[in-house]
Amino acid sequence: MNVRLVPLAVTLAGALVAGACTSAAATTGARSTAGHVVGPAAKASRIKELGVFEPGVPRSYKPVETFAHAVGRQPNIVQYYSGWWEPFRAGFAKTAHSHGATVFVDIDPYGVPVAGIAAGDNDVYLTSFAKAVHKFGHNVIISFGHEPNGKWYPWGYTHTKAATWVKAWRHIVAVFRSAGATNVTWLWIVNRQAAGEGAIRSWWPGASYVTWTGIDGYYEKKGQTFSSVFGPTIRSIRKLTSRPVLVSETAVGQAAGKAAKIPGLFSGIRARHLLGLVWFDQHQRAGSHHQDWRLEDSPAAVTAFRRGLRG
């Protein structure tokens, strides 16, 4: 969980959607990133997907280039958060594509009733967004209302019924398909399991509406390991689906010991044959959930990250 400060969250929010979920749609217009081998046959030495979120995107790509220089590899996923009613940032998506990256849009419905989305009240906006994605022509990763099993967002647990959220997710996917936007990887994202959260299975839209699954989780304390942060959630997801799993938002805080924990993050991803990770490269200043997550302020962490990428 990384509950963003409200001003940031209200102005950001996005959804990256991958390929259709029916067998025909899943193969139409999707980039090869959606078709990675996952499981025992996958090569353990390669982190397939390296993603990053940087403050300042999608206004500028420069922070992503700075990150790429630091870690010695161009990310092939670049995330931005898209507020409801914001248009698809096609210009930024084109820039990302020119750098060999797929844009990942996390669309979050701040200020909009989820029941209304499910009922079709916002279809004009959704259709416009979908048509812009279709026109872009390259793969886009989209997520909607991330971390719904947590209770810190208005679309999540204790605020919105899981059945309503699921209905909204399915409706959004249907609108995109109707608009011809088959170049989407639909990324269903949950927060890593913790006490006091909703059951992950309650928020599952079904395999025909999901391309990848994602887990958001952070190292906030020294005693945490990959198994303790992600293990239970991976097991819960595997009971629901065999869809590929991405660590969709993560970082190691200074309180946990960045350089010391990063090797375990990479080895855990490899050992469980996950797609890779999206690093949340932002300095926050509000307690354990909002630490300094940046790599660039720690030479030892950068070195550990580079080694982790190499395997």
Image (cartoon, helix red, strand yellow):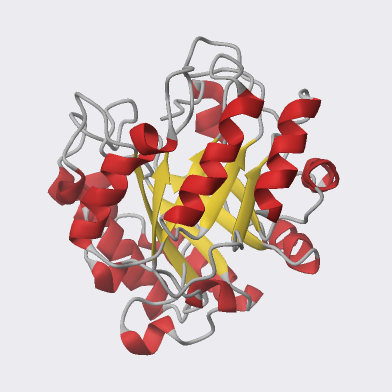
> Is residue 76 visible in this depiction of the protein?
yes
Q: In the visual, does 204 lie left or right of 77?
A: left
The quadrant of the image that shows the N terminus is top left
The residue drawn where x is 45% and y is 54% is: 271
x and y, in percent, of residue 52 in the image: 65, 46
The residue drawn where x is 69% and y is 61% is: 93
Question: Is residue 194 shown above or below 102?
Answer: above
Question: Is residue 191 shown above or below 241?
Answer: above
Question: Is residue 92 shown above or below 200?
Answer: below
x and y, in percent, of residue 31 in the image: 58, 78
x and y, in percent, of residue 81 in the image: 55, 43
Q: In the visual, does 214 lie left or right of 118?
A: right
The quadrant of the image that shows the C terminus is bottom right
Figure quadrant of residue 168: bottom left
> Is residue 14 visible in this depiction of the protein?
no
Q: In the visual, does 205 lie left or right of 89?
A: left
Q: Nearer the viewer, residue 239 or 214?
A: 239
Q: In the visual, does 43 lie left or right of 167?
A: right
Query: How many numbered markers are drawn?
Result: 0
Q: Nearer the viewer, residue 92 or 204?
A: 204
Question: Is residue 171 shown above or below 109?
Answer: below
The residue drawn where x is 71% and y is 30% is: 301
Q: Nearer the viewer, residue 190 or 130?
A: 190
x and y, in percent, of residue 208 in the image: 26, 73
Figure quadrant of residue 147: top left
